Amino acid sequence: MLPELTQDQVLRRGLVARLLLSDDGFRSFFEETKELILSSIGNTQPEAKDERETLYLRFNALNDLLSTIQSYSDAAEAIQKLRETETDS
C-alpha cells in the first residue's frame, strides 16, 4: 500500500511527471520498447505460452507505469486549479 501524500508532494511528483511526459525521448523509449515486446510476442512459437505471458506482463507493466505518471500529472494540475480558485475567492 502506498503512503498518503500531501498536496505539495503530489505537486512535486506531478511536475516531474509533466516534464517526463513532454519529453519526446522519454516517450519514444516507451513506445519503442512496447513495439519490441509486441514483436517478440508475435514471433513466439505457438507452444511458448509462458514466454508470451511474461511478455504480456512486461507490456502491461509499461502501460501501468505510463498511466501512473499521467495520473500524477493530472492530479497536480487539478490541485493547481483548485488553489487558483481558492486564491481568487
Image (cartoon, rainbow, N blue to C red):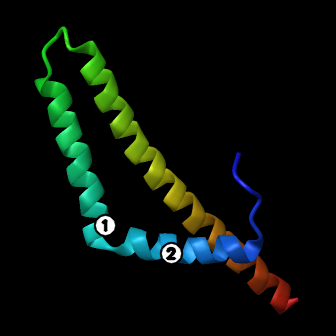
- In the image as oriented, which residue stretches furthest toward the right? 89
Pick the front one: 32 or 3? 3
Residue at image coords 27%, 14%? 49
Residue shown at 29%/55% (left/top)?
A: 30
Tell me if residue 45 comes above or below residue 71 in the rendering: above
Q: Specify the quadrant of the image occupied by residue 71.
A: bottom right
Residue flagged by tag 2: what amino acid is it? Answer: Val
Q: Which residue is at the front of the view, 29 or 80?
A: 29
- The residue most toward the top is 47
Residue 13 is left or right of residue 56, and the answer is right
Q: Is residue 13 above or below residue 27?
A: below
Q: Which image quadrant is residue 40 in?
A: top left
Q: Residues within 10 Å of mark 2 (few under 14, many from 20)?
A: some
Image location of residue 48, percent across then percent down: 20, 14
Would you place residue 32 above or below residue 78 in this image? above
Decide if residue 42 is on the left or right side of residue 17. left
Do the numbered discs 1 and 2 sit on residues whose CB atoms are within 8 Å? no
User: Which disc number belongs to residue 26?
Assistant: 1
C-alpha separation, residue under disc 1 versus residue under disc 2: 12 Å
Nearest the camera: 71 or 86? 71
Q: Which residue is label 2 attached to?
A: 16
Q: Position of residue 1 (x, y in %)?
A: 71, 45
Which dot marks residue 81? none
List x then y, in percent, for residue 68.
53, 54
Q: Residue at x 31, y 63 (%)?
A: 27
Image spot of residue 41 (x, y percent): 20, 28
Count how many numbered circles sit on residues in the image. 2
What secondary structure is found at the residue carrying circle 1? helix
* Residue type at the position of mark 1: Phe
Q: Which one is earlier in the sequence, the residue at label 1 or at label 2?
A: 2
Q: Quadrant of the C terminus?
A: bottom right
Could you tell me which residue is drawn at 64 percent across and 72 percent down?
76
